């Protein structure tokens, strides 16, 4: 039996899916950030979860982590060219979200959780 080719949408969701990655990417699209800056920008995320998400995105090649040899260590995160190529994907999601809000006449998510402002 031949192995099935992976679904391209599934691949995309594995790289940027989940509650936090889009919000982290949204912040990184504005430029290089230190960990504490990302942590402040992404409301509600724990430091542990932020570390996990950044490591996962680094492993997928969309985030670059640069450690400066100084005390205390300075670490900066930025998007790789592959990460920057996600801009049209995020903009399409943003547009769809605006259209959904307009169609439903609602500014809140069905679960009652507010989304990130963009």
Image (tube, rainbow, N blue to C red):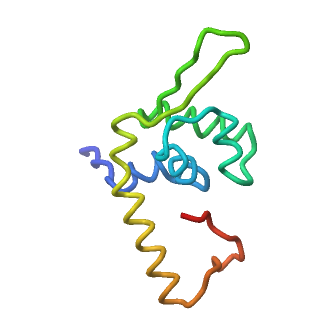
Looking at this rendering, what residue extends furthest in the left direction?
A: 2
> Is 88 left or right of 97, judged from the image as shown?
left
Percent x, y of residue 51: 66, 34
Q: Quadrant of residue 38?
A: top right
> Is 52 left or right of 48, judged from the image as shown?
left
Residue drawn 48% across the image and 89% down it: 103
Image vertical order of residue 69 relative to residue 104, above or below: above
> Is 96 left or right of 51, judged from the image as shown?
left
Q: Quadrant of residue 15?
A: top left
Residue drawn 53% across the image and 64% down it: 118
Name the residue nearer the viewer: 107 or 15. Answer: 107
Residue drawn 32% across the image and 53% down it: 8
Image vertical order of residue 105 relative to residue 37, above or below: below
Image vertical order of residue 108 relative to residue 104, above or below: above
Name the residue nearer the viewer: 14 or 98. Answer: 98
Percent x, y of residue 97: 48, 74
> Is 79 left or right of 42, judged from the image as shown?
left
Number of numbered tags placed on the structure image: 0
Percent x, y of residue 68: 58, 14
Percent x, y of residue 19: 61, 56
Which quadrant holds the N terminus?
top left
Residue drawn 74% across the image and 38% down it: 47
């Amino acid at each position: 039996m031949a192995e099935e080719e992976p679904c391209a949408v599934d691949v995309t969701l594995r790289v940027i899916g989940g509650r936090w990655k889009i919000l982290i990417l949204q912040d990184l699209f504005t430029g290089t950030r230190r960990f504490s800056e990302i942590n402040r920008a992404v409301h509600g995320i724990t430091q542990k979860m932020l570390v996990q998400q950044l490591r996962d995105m680094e492993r997928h090649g969309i985030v670059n982590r640069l450690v400066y040899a100084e005390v205390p260590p300075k670490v900066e995160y930025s998007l790789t060219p592959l990460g920057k190529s996600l801009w049209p994907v995020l903009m399409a999601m943003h547009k769809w979200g605006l259209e959904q809000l307009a169609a439903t006449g609602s500014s809140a998510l069905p679960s009652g959780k507010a989304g990130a402002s963009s």
